[in-house]
Image (tube, rainbow, N blue to C red):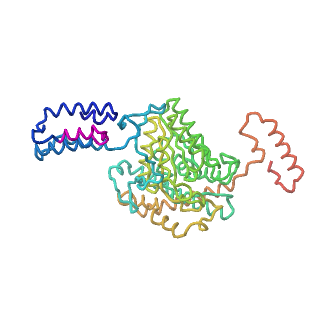
């Protein structure tokens, strides 16, 4: 009867229910006696006069009260079902066929995958209240949060990372001052980001291809790029690998699998995906690692590269240095999302946020990301949270757009070098004497490299047209001729050996 009551709303259905009820009354213990009539008969009589709208509801209420009186306070499932039927029957509907029973397990067989349906109108939140947590191993005082992870780093590896961080910091100090003295035309430091440089380099294989932005010279330092190589490139002398064709700090080394840096932001990311896909086709046991800053994530190439890598399952590790500032633009003016890490998830890329000032955390994150990228043949995104302690470059004065107190706070409280030093000292692997010797040696190397680079001759202007084409195109031949004739016409304005 429940089925009929819920599904049948037509006049014909009503008459059928009425007939069933009449048959049931004859068997009901509450049939009328000689002195009184049954309430059921009274209900039927009223409905016969055209008052059929509330017939079903009134009947169910009558059944409920009658059965309750006869059976006491005992509640049976049939009575609870009757209450549900009653509630359903009283609702207004737009058709004569009853309510549609929505199935939550129904799915849309979309070409991109099955999508479940829901009757709830819910929008995904634009800014999640709960932000993605930041993975780390060492706290600001160098104490280990997870001893198991710290055991992965041996004494030899830890001291090599630490020495590299100190050397990089020393190189930045001397080269920056050299630019201020007019000995270099331009420079850009990595102050505050030394852990990202050396720890990530330590976690990679030398077969892995690196495409950097411009704040990752420590990777080259780790792989064997000498201090003299850095100085020669920055001065643009004849001994430098670029022979002055590139601006300072645009390092590169084919032998060290470090692609030469270029000025346009984010162009290296799509290139990295293409290189990674070539490794995939050749079944190489290596990956590509592309470094970029938070400002680069605002470029279109970033999104194109992530989607490209995800679709092609390219073994590439995207490493974002979120240092809070894109030159003078803070991250609060760049995006409303929870940083960069959530963007990877949106493209279907496994992603992690790591403390960029924690060398052990960076090392373990990059090591795990590399293994995952190669074994699963897919891209990985790392967002390293750090802070750009230095000015953007020697062409910038960051005190014009950010508080000095903020800079000093990150420089002293969150120094990656100080944090790692406290840890190695606590392990008994480092002493004050070794610290002093390291600084003396690093300063000596840098000063000597700059002095030697200044003694080297500058490359002749004709080298601007070499090392690219095997046979010089006609347009470049014409330009070379014009340049040579111009120098000959103005000998007083050009040195004798310039060409």
- Between 279 and 455, the one nearer to me in the picture: 279
Q: Main secondary structure of the magenta part?
A: helix
In the displayed structure, 184 sits above or below 403; it is above
- The front one of 258 and 129 is 129
Could you say which quadrant of the image residue 453 lies in?
Answer: bottom right
Q: Image height check: is 342 above or below 439?
A: above
> Is 438 on the left or on the right of 89, as rendered?
right
420 horizontally vs 26: left or right: right
From the viewer's perspective, is 492 left or right of 116?
A: right
From what the image shows, is residue 396 above or below residue 482? below
Who's the residue at 46% across and 38% down the image? Answer: 373
Q: Is residue 442 visible?
A: no
Report x, y in % for residue 428: 35, 58
Indicate the position of residue 334 as horizontal and vertical percent values: 56, 56
Q: How many marks?
A: 0
**Where residue 195 sits: x, y (%)?**
48, 54
State the extent of the magenta-drawn residues as a range.
Answer: 39-55
Residue under the point 50% across and 50% down? 340
- Identify the residue at the far front of this view: 35
In-front residue for pair 182/474: 474
Residue 53 belongs to the span the image colors magenta: yes
């Amino acid at each position: 009867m429940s089925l009929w009551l819920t599904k049948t709303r037509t006049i014909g259905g009503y008459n059928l229910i009425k007939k069933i009820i009449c048959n049931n009354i004859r068997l009901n213990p509450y049939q009328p006696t000689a002195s009184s009539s049954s309430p059921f008969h009274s209900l039927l009589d009223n409905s016969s006069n055209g008052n059929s709208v509330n017939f079903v509801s009134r009947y169910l209420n009558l059944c409920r009260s009658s059965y309750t009186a006869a059976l006491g306070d005992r509640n049976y499932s049939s009575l609870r079902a009757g209450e549900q039927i009653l509630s359903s029957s009283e609702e207004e509907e737009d058709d004569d066929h009853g309510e549609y029973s929505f199935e939550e397990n129904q799915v849309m067989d979309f070409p991109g995958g099955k999508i479940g349906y829901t009757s709830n109108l819910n929008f995904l939140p634009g800014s999640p209240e709960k932000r993605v947590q930041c993975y780390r191993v060492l706290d600001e005082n160098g104490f280990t949060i997870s001893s198991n992870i710290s055991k992965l780093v041996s004494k030899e590896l830890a001291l090599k990372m630490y020495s590299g961080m100190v050397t990089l910091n020393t190189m930045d100090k001397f080269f920056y001052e050299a630019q201020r003295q007019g000995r270099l035309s331009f420079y850009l430091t990595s102050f505050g980001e030394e852990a990202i440089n050396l720890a990530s380099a330590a976690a990679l294989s030398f077969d892995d291809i690196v495409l950097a932005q411009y704040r990752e010279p420590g990777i080259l330092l780790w792989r064997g790029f000498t201090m003299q190589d850095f100085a020669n490139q920055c001065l643009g002398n004849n001994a430098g690998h670029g022979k002055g064709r590139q601006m300072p700090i645009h390092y590169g080394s084919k032998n060290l699998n470090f692609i030469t840096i270029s000025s346009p932001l984010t162009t290296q990311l799509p290139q990295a995906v293409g290189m990674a896909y070539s490794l995939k086709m050749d079944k190489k046991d290596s990956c590509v690692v592309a470094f970029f800053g938070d400002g680069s994530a605002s470029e279109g190439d970033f999104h194109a590269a992530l989607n490209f890598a995800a679709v092609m399952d390219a073994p590439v590790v995207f490493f974002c240095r979120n240092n809070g500032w894109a030159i003078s633009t803070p991250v609060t003016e760049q995006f409303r999302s929870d940083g960069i890490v959530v963007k990877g998830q949106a493209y279907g890329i496994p992603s992690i946020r790591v403390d960029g000032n924690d060398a052990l955390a960076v090392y373990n994150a990059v090591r795990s990301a590399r293994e995952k990228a190669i074994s699963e043949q897919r891209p990985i995104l790392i967002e390293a949270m750090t802070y750009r302690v230095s000015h953007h470059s020697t062409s910038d004065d960051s005190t014009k757009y950010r508080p000095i107190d903020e800079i000093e706070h990150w420089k002293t409280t969150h120094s990656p070098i100080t944090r790692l030093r406290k840890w190695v000292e606590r392990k008994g692997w480092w002493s004050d004497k070794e610290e002093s010797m390291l600084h003396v040696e690093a300063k000596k190397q840098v000063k000597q490299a700059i002095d030697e680079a200044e003694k080297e001759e500058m490359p002749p202007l004709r080298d601007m047209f070499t090392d690219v084409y095997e046979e010089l195109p006609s347009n470049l031949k014409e330009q070379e001729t014009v340049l040579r004739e111009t120098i000959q016409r103005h000998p007083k304005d050009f040195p004798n050996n310039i060409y």
